[in-house]
């Protein structure tokens, strides 16, 4: 077989010219790999050190905050068992035989037929379920009835005295502060709680302090006017 010396020479020439580039690229690649590995090793070392320090601090803190007594005997609550719960609602003593997990809202609506208190979101976000417990407003969907044994609970049904509306109810009527009325019992109970708290000095305060009560109909301007009237004593706010 005849060897093409000319072609072979050209190939050798080509390799000789490319070799430095090839070697230098290979060298660069190896250097990069080494640098990267060194950086990773450094990070691992730092992370390891920081981790060890944090672990030490955490163990120390946990050891300090750990109660000294280790024998805790908690009696498990059977959520399916029924218990007697005495509640004082709108001035009347009521005894319910309910599961401990029954919310105050469900106890009022489902067991006592006090359906004036409304269930909107059932998640503490709309305020439709607001009632007064010892004069303070709370979302009854977020609390268990059993937690309020002995407390004075006032719902929308308990605000009026016979045929005489509570001043806040009268102000809502006078200022047309509702449309569909679904949010209104919660708005009124919340407004009564706001008056009891005594923090509202301006319309902006009223809006802020009533912001937990949502009105889908957008009756807000009239609600603010009604609450302001009671606050300014144009309507007597005594509960
Ligand atoms: Fe309780 Fe909406 S139903 S906050
Ligand atoms: Fe309709 Fe408030 S009056 S949601």
Image: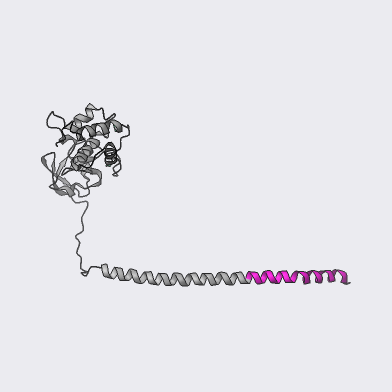
When asked about the image quadrant of residue 70, the answer is: bottom left
Q: How many marks?
A: 0
The quadrant in which the N terminus is found is bottom right
Q: Is residue 21 left or right of residue 96?
A: right
Q: Is residue 164 left or right of residue 66?
A: left
When asked about the image quadrant of residue 211, the answer is: top left
Stretch in magenta: 1-29
Q: Main secondary structure of the magenta part?
A: helix
Any part of residue 4 in sight: no
Any part of residue 140 in sight: yes
Q: Return the x and y of residue 150 as percentages of the image width and height.
A: 12, 47
What colour scheme does the image use? Answer: one colour
Q: Is residue 2 left or right of residue 18?
A: right
- Residue at 38% from the left image edge and 71% from the top image edge: 53
* Residue 177 vertical placement versus 16 (above, below): above
Q: Return the x and y of residue 200 as percentages of the image width and height.
A: 24, 40
The quadrant in which the C terminus is found is top left
Let me know if residue 150 is in the magenta part.
no
* Residue 88 vertical placement versus 164 (above, below): below
- Residue at 33% from the left image edge and 68% from the top image edge: 58
When asked about the image quadrant of residue 10, the answer is: bottom right
Q: Nearer the viewer, residue 41 or 8?
A: 41
* Residue 11 vertical placement versus 146 (above, below): below
Q: Return the x and y of residue 216 as percentages of the image width and height.
A: 32, 34
Outermost residue toward the right? 2
Let me know if residue 6 is in the magenta part.
yes
Q: Nearer the viewer, residue 146 or 35?
A: 35
């Amino acid at each position: 077989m005849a060897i093409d010396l000319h072609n072979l020479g050209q190939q050798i020439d080509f390799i000789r010219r490319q070799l430095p580039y090839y070697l230098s690229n290979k060298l660069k690649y190896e250097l990069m790999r080494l640098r990267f590995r060194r950086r990773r090793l450094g990070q691992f070392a730092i992370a390891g050190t920081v981790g060890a320090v944090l672990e030490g601090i955490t163990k120390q803190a946990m050891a300090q905050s750990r109660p000294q007594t280790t024998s805790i005997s908690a009696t498990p609550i059977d959520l399916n068992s029924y218990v007697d719960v005495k509640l004082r609602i709108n001035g009347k003593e009521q005894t319910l035989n309910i599961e401990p997990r029954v919310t105050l809202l469900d106890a009022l609506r489902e067991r006592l037929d006090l359906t004036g208190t409304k269930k909107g979101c059932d998640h503490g976000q709309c305020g439709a379920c607001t009632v007064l417990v010892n004069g303070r407003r709370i979302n009854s969907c977020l609390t268990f009835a059993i937690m309020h044994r002995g407390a004075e609970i006032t719902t929308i049904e308990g605000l009026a005295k016979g045929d005489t509306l509570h001043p806040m109810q009268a102000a809502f009527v006078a200022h047309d502060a509702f449309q569909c009325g679904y949010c209104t019992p919660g708005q009124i109970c919340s407004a009564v709680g706001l008056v009891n708290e005594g923090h509202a000095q301006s319309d902006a305060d009223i809006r802020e302090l009533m912001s937990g009560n949502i009105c889908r109909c957008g009756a807000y301007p009239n609600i603010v006017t009604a609450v302001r009237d009671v606050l300014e004593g144009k309507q007597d706010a005594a509960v």
